[in-house]
Image (tube, rainbow, N blue to C red):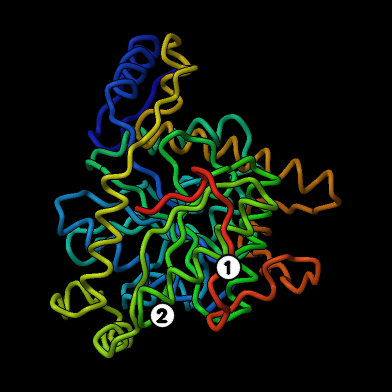
């Protein structure tokens, strides 16, 4: 059986040598920093946050790949005014190569539309899995950071991703409904996926004291009821320059680099860049397992496994799944967050400073 290397245009006739070379290449890759930007509900400014964090990281010298998990006219490509005629699903179907689907954006940022492809990852057979992992593993462009614009609420496939270099940033606005939804999302992820650490970025607040109050209340309740750690990533003020750049589908970093909001996004990006990343010690002495956490191929391998686990849990709860071609465009609507038993439902921007539990669980960065 011959393997075709499309990018180079020639065949490799020795499968054994090709597999060994592929493993060496995968092990040689550095693990990119995987950052999922999530929100409990729509309307928090999550996509704008992704755009501006990506711009700040790129201008700081990082090679950034954005994966957009949202489908439809409001996806990230549409927000930036970019034409996205193809999707990750076209790579899965072998209609297009990965580099043909990825779009070039401002500041050298690369964008992978994945709104139709993400929902089918948990349904892939072994051949499709291998094909997709190889596509990502063979991607030639350097990638320091993978920034995911997650589907809102619990619909995201990225929330259960188990990688030592994976971080979850929860964007929250000062409205009580947004805070309640963010807490419900954190509760879901920690309970179902075992994630114990989250970052919180407070959006659309004018003063640091207001943002700090919202975060402190969230962190105290999360510590008390969920035993999870929240890290304060900062806040983004809602200045006119940010609104203008949003209307034009550009980053405020690019259009108005001296704006207060641009400085806030740069600070948030710096905190991401300098946060210590843990090492997966359990894989240190196992070359095969170590390969699973290396490079973009390792990232996709873990994402597929996480998606399969998520699908299995949904199936145990009576969930349904469709075929790749018929079910790809269907996405789950954000979960309702009107659980009156939620201990955070009364937190809002007018609360007085609450009593926070003592201990190392609340960290400020």
What x and y, as percent, mark residue 312? 75, 41
Sequence-wise first label, 2 or 1: 2
Front residue (pair 216, 269): 216
What x and y, as percent, mark residue 143? 26, 43
| Residue 70 shown left or right of residue 154 in the figure | left
Residue shown at 14% from the left, 75% from the top: 257
| Residue 340 shown left or right of residue 193 in the figure | right
Q: Is residue 76 above or below residue 311?
A: below
Check disc 2 and report the residue beneath it: 204
What x and y, as percent, mark residue 29? 28, 28
Residue shown at 36% from the left, 83% from the top: 206
Crowding at mark 1 (Cα within 10 Å: few <14, some 14-19, many 20+)? some
Front residue (pair 153, 185): 185
Q: What's the distance in space between the residues labelled 2 and 1, CA to CA?
A: 21 Å
Check disc 1 and report the residue beneath it: 354
Helix, strand or loop at label 1? It is loop
Examine the image and state in which quarter residue 266 appears: bottom left
């Amino acid at each position: 059986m011959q393997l075709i290397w499309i990018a180079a245009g020639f065949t490799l006739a020795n499968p054994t040598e090709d597999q060994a070379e592929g493993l060496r290449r995968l092990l040689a890759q550095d693990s990119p920093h995987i950052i999922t930007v999530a929100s409990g509900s729509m309307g928090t400014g999550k996509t704008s946050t992704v755009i501006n964090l990506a711009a700040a990281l790129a201008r700081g010298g990082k090679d950034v790949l954005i994966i957009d998990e949202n489908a439809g006219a409001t996806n990230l490509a549409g927000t930036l005014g970019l034409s996205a005629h193809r999707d990750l699903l076209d790579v899965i179907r072998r209609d297009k190569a990965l580099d043909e689907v990825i779009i070039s954006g401002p500041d050298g940022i690369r964008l992978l539309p994945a709104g139709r492809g993400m929902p089918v990852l948990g349904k892939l057979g072994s051949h499709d899995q291998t094909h997709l992992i190889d596509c990502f593993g063979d991607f030639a462009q350097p990638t320091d950071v993978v920034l995911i614009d997650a589907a809102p609420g619990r619909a995201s496939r990225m929330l259960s991703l188990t990688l030592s270099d994976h971080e979850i940033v929860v964007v929250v606005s000062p409205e009580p409904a947004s805070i309640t939804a963010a807490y419900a999302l954190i509760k879901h992820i920690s309970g179902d996926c075992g994630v114990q650490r989250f970052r919180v970025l407070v959006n659309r607040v004018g003063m640091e004291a207001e943002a700090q109050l919202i975060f402190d209340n969230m962190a105290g309740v999360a510590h008390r009821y969920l035993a999870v750690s929240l890290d304060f990533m900062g806040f983004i003020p809602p200045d006119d320059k940010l609104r203008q750049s949003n209307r034009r589908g550009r980053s405020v970093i690019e259009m108005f680099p001296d704006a207060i909001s641009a400085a806030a996004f740069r600070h948030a990006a710096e905190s991401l860049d300098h946060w210590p990343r843990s090492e997966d010690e359990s894989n240190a002495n196992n070359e095969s397992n170590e390969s699973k956490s290396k490079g973009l191929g390792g990232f996709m391998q873990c994402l597929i496994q996480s998606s399969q686990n998520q699908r299995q849990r949904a199936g145990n709860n009576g969930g349904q799944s469709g075929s790749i071609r018929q079910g790809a465009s269907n996405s789950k609507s954000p979960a309702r967050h009107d659980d009156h038993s939620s201990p955070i439902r009364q937190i809002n921007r007018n609360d007085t400073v609450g009593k926070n539990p003592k201990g190392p669980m609340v960290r400020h960065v």
